[in-house]
Image (cartoon, rainbow, N blue to C red):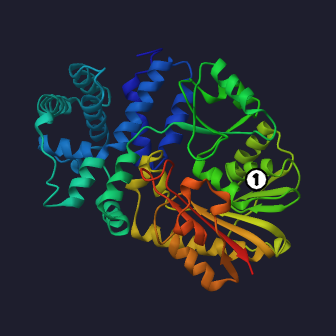
Amino acid sequence: MTNGINTRELILEILLEIEEEGRHSHIAIRNALSKYQFLPRQERAFITRVCEGTLEYRILIDYIIDSYSKVTVDKMKPAIREILRSGVYQIKFMDSVPDSAVCNEAVKLAQRKGFYNLKPFVNGVLRTIAREYKNLEFPSREQDLVRFLSVKYSMPENLVNRWLEAYGEEKTEMILAEFLKEKPVTVRCRIHKYPQEEIYRSLTEQGVKVTPAPYLPYAYEISDYNHILALDAFIQGKIQVQDVSSMLVAEVADPKKGDYIIDMCAAPGGKSLHAGDKMGNYGTVDARDVSQQKVDLIEENINRLDSINVQARVMDATVFDVDSELKADIVLADVPCSGYGVIGKKPEIKYRVTPQKQEEIVILQRTILDRAAEYVKPGGVLVFSTCTIAKEENEENMMWFMNHHPFKLESLDPFLPQELHSETTALGYLQLLPGVHKTDGFFIAKFRRK
């Protein structure tokens, strides 16, 4: 308890907001922490870890609860369900919190929320789990591989099934294990404007741990800092937060000084700004997105980076813009997708998947690709990318696009580091898989207009 704020009550509110209101986890956590900025660093870290961990391991946690509770998780009241889930997460994964404290705090929280008569239930379930969960057996791998992987790695069975079909058992298990690992923050150094040594020095002098990121020499992984907004290198626009997989898009696009680039779905602007930087302040990047809110995010980054060749405007990527027809040297189409490649950073994605949503996404992507094709000038380039590992959104849409438009795939090898070269990159596309590659899951294809 700090300044009248009950940490565990705040955790409960965040989890209910994610579960009941469908809020994205990173936004719900960020909003709560910015509302209570006075909380000490240790408590902020505790809140973040319990919220993210409870979400990430929800399927395993529910399996544990259902093994020891007379009432199954799906029949519980939402507040009780989240109190138990976050309690089990702390018991199983946080040695720094004594089990007795977890049980006591959970019981107090149930009472504060008006569930006086459920105090014995909460107490009984958590104390039994604390005593006995280490003896609990997983489903049998031999008898039901899908169920085993689902519980062990907390991934819905329908996704486990899909990836087993697409990638086989070994790769699927690598992907599932990777999603549960902690992800460092990756930044792109703006080396066209600032010497990389200067950026490195600025970060380390503020106590930041800096390690080289994979694949690209100008990318760093950073950790051991309180808030990115307090880092001089960030404030001064010397670095941009961006995953390496997303940086590869501007590498593959290979813009030249003076090019006109359209970025169809640009927010928060990482790829647009990277392309602008690669042109050394020449040319124009027309960064578009569907709402003012998204465009505000891009503009915030343009202003911080003082980027003079990137402009942002509200435009719906599904609506044809006659003024752009055959005008662009390069079009970037980083289309909305299921997001399966970034489950490690946004764990709620895995629980919100439906076959219907999947179909709608594929149709939306095709609509945007149809529009994108009309803006590329003869001989110009279209770079299509997603942050997913779903074949129907990636390879299948790539094939569909080539069957419907006068474009051909172009080899990615000249633009990628040697260790990413493969048969598919020689053809013109790259599917990055978490755990197999050292990045998020990501897809890139490069087309040239005939």
Nearer to me, 427 or 65: 427
- State the SS at label 1: helix
From this view, report whether residue 295 is shown above or below residue 27.
below
Q: Residue at x 22, y 49 (%)?
A: 75
- Residue 181 on image: x %, y %: 40, 40
Q: Residue at x 48, y 24 (%)?
A: 44
Q: Residue at x 62, y 29 (%)?
A: 228
- The quarter of the image holding the N terminus is top left
User: What residue occupies the far top of the structure in this picture?
Assistant: 3
- Residue 378 on image: x %, y %: 81, 78
Nearer to me, 293 or 230: 230
The quarter holding residue 106 reads top left
Q: Residue at x 50, y 60 (%)?
A: 388
Nearer to me, 109 or 137: 137
Residue type highlighted by circle 1: Ala
- Residue 256 on image: x %, y %: 83, 58
Q: Which residue is mark 1?
A: 275
From this view, report whether residue 230 is shown above or below residue 358.
above
User: What residue occupies the far front of the structure in this picture?
Assistant: 418
- Residue 307 on image: x %, y %: 82, 44
From this view, report whether residue 83 is shown above or below residue 355.
above
